[in-house]
Amino acid sequence: MKIKGIITIARPQFLILSIILGFLGTAIAWYEHQEYGGPFHLGYAFLATFGLMVAHMSVNTFNDYFDSRSTLDTKTERTPFSGGSGAIQSGLLTEKQALWIGIATLVVIIPIGVFFVLVSGWLLLPLLAIAVLCIIIYTPFILKMGYPEWSAGLGLGVLPVLGAYFIQTGTYSISALLASIPSGILVHNLLLLNEFPDTEHDVNVKRRTLPIFVGKKRAAIFYSVLNIIVYLWIIGTVIHGDMPAFALLGLLTFFLAFKAIDGSFKYNDKSKLISAMANNVTVVLITQLLIGAGFIVAGILK
């Protein structure tokens, strides 16, 4: 097993998302800590974010393993955002090694989860159980359901933000849930647009992603509507008082989102689609980062 293979299959450039999700959930909790008091543990934040990264690595590894077993990754044309890591196809890892890495990373997050259940409360357990279930069954089952994108939005969007918030507060709140919704939509859309280049090969291995299920044009419309909802949601929650006014910093990515929307309808032009995918990744990461920064600034100014 080569170190380069482990790094490649982990796709560290994608793990930035986990860091930002951990930051956002922690930022919401810290903002409320500034307002209402109570304990705040920076060490918990780092440990939770590490756990998120390992869980994300597990998802990536299992995805590569199952896609190699189905021979999908030997047929798809890899892009910087889709088509797998190529670690198995290039000989850096065997399928068996990839499977063991997936299992090992899954095992690593179990004691972290147990620790936080013990120190923060048992109500974290259902959230962790759903997250682990999504990791295990995502590629072999959920991707064949006709609308698998919800799983990414939930498991790599809403739940990580709520989890990072819960470990600091020991509870859930409506405001934290509302603040996590943009993350769910953005990560949903991250997966959705990245599926466009692979539809022709995905259908041959019985995957039923949204671009396959409803067609690329309708999927692009759905993607566009959800993108717009993100920005309306930010405005609405600020007006309603569920997020601080500085969360409006998230609106700064709207121009890039518009470019991604425009490119999503040009799915037959590879270069324009890849450009749209790049813009989409930037929107997903920076929008959440700016919302989290908005909570931090608002907390500082209290």
Image (cartoon, helix red, strand yellow):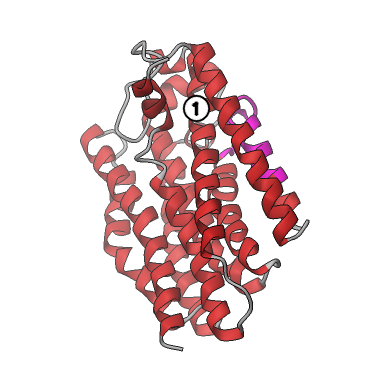
74 left or right, relative to 124 = left
Quadrant of the drawing holding the N terminus: top left
Choose between 147 and 83: the one closer to the eye.
Answer: 83
Q: Is 222 in front, or is 276?
A: 276
Which residue corresponds to the image point at 54% horizontal and 44% vertical from the top-left? 152
Q: Quadrant of residue 200?
A: top left
**Amino acid at dot 1:** Thr
Q: Is residue 105 magenta?
A: no
Per the image, the residue denoted by label 1 is 61
In the image, what residue occupies the spot 48% across and 63% down?
24
Image quadrant in which you'd find residue 258: bottom left
Left or right, 27 with respect to 162, comes to: left
Residue 227 drawn above or below residue 30: above
Would residue 142 be visible to someone looking at this image?
A: no
Establish if 278 lies above or below 200: below
User: Where's residue 92, x and y in %?
Assistant: 37, 15
Q: Looking at this view, name the residue that lies furthest to the bottom.
A: 302
Q: Nearer the viewer, residue 221 or 275?
A: 275
Residue located 39% across and 79% down the image:
297
Q: Is residue 147 magenta?
A: yes
Per the picture, the main secondary structure of the magenta-coloured stretch is: helix
What SS does tag 1 mark? helix
At horizontal 34% and vertical 59% (from top left) the residue drawn is 286
Packing grade of label 1 (10 A; few <14, some 14-19, many >=20) is many
**How many marks do you count on the picture?**
1
Is 222 drawn above or below residue 72 in the view shown? below
Q: Is residue 66 above or below residue 22?
A: above
Q: Can residue 45 be seen in this snapshot?
A: yes
Q: Position of residue 116 (x, y in %)?
A: 67, 54
Left-right relation of 298 to 37: left
Specify start and end residues of the magenta stretch as a single range.
Answer: 129-148
The x, y position of residue 278, in whole percent, is 28, 45
